[in-house]
Amino acid sequence: MAERGWGSVAERLGTGGASGPTTYANNVQILPSSVDLTFVFSQLVLTPGEAPTDPPNVSEALVQRLIMSPQHAKLFLQLLQQNITRWEQQFGEIGVSPPRDLQPPPAEQERNAP
């Protein structure tokens, strides 16, 4: 009997070995509307500036755009949290720092204003 564990994606999804293309994204934008949430996954690529003292150039390439209902997005969030917890139990805590440009929603900014 096979050991219980992560297994392959095909095994977990029950696709019988069929698989689609695999892509890498290191950036996501979430665009909410009143009826759905759009996730825009992209790759940010840094290339050196023209001169050694120039800052790097940043280019963005669209990888995939996914649109989900709020209900499916919430279920996705729950599944993602379960899998991150499982990953951290196996491999250790994932350290992240908050994005520098992340701002609280306008209503929260107003509540916290002096």
Image (tube, helix red, strand yellow):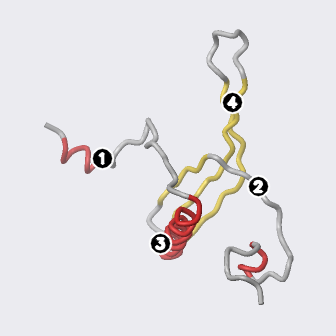
Q: CA distance from mark 4 to mark 1?
A: 31 Å
Which numbered dot is residue 106? 1
The local crowd at label 4, few if under 14, some if 14 to 19, many if 20 or more residues have their Cα within 10 Å, is few
Q: CA distance from mark 3 to mark 2?
A: 23 Å
Which callout, 2 or 4, points at the residue further toward the start of the chain?
Answer: 2
Which callout, 4 or 1, points at the residue further toward the start of the chain?
Answer: 4
| Residue position for label 2 | 23
Which callout, 1 or 3, points at the residue further toward the start of the chain?
Answer: 3
Q: Tell me the residue at 75%/72% (across/down).
A: 9
Q: Is residue 71 above or below residue 48?
A: below
Q: CA distance from mark 1 to mark 2?
A: 34 Å
Which numbered dot is residue 88? none
Q: Is residue 36 left or right of residue 47?
A: left
Of residues 64 and 82, the one nearer the viewer is 82
How far from the left and from the top, in percent, is residue 100? 44, 36
Which callout, 1 or 2, points at the residue further toward the start of the chain?
Answer: 2
Q: CA distance from mark 1 to mark 3?
A: 22 Å
| Residue position for label 3 | 74
How far from the left and from the top, in percent, is residue 2? 76, 85
Task: Please state, as top left, top right, bottom left or bottom right, where the N terminus lies in the image.
Answer: bottom right
Q: Do the residues under discs 2 and 4 have CB atoms within 8 angstroms?
A: no
Q: CA distance from mark 3 to mark 4?
A: 32 Å
Q: Do the residues under discs 1 and 3 have CB atoms within 8 angstroms?
A: no
Mark 1 or mark 2: which is in front?
2
Q: Tell me the residue at 80%/81% (across/down).
A: 15
The type of residue carrying mark 2 is Thr
Q: Do the residues under discs 1 and 2 have CB atoms within 8 angstroms?
A: no
How far from the left and from the top, in percent, is residue 20? 83, 67
Of residues 92 and 44, the one nearer the viewer is 92
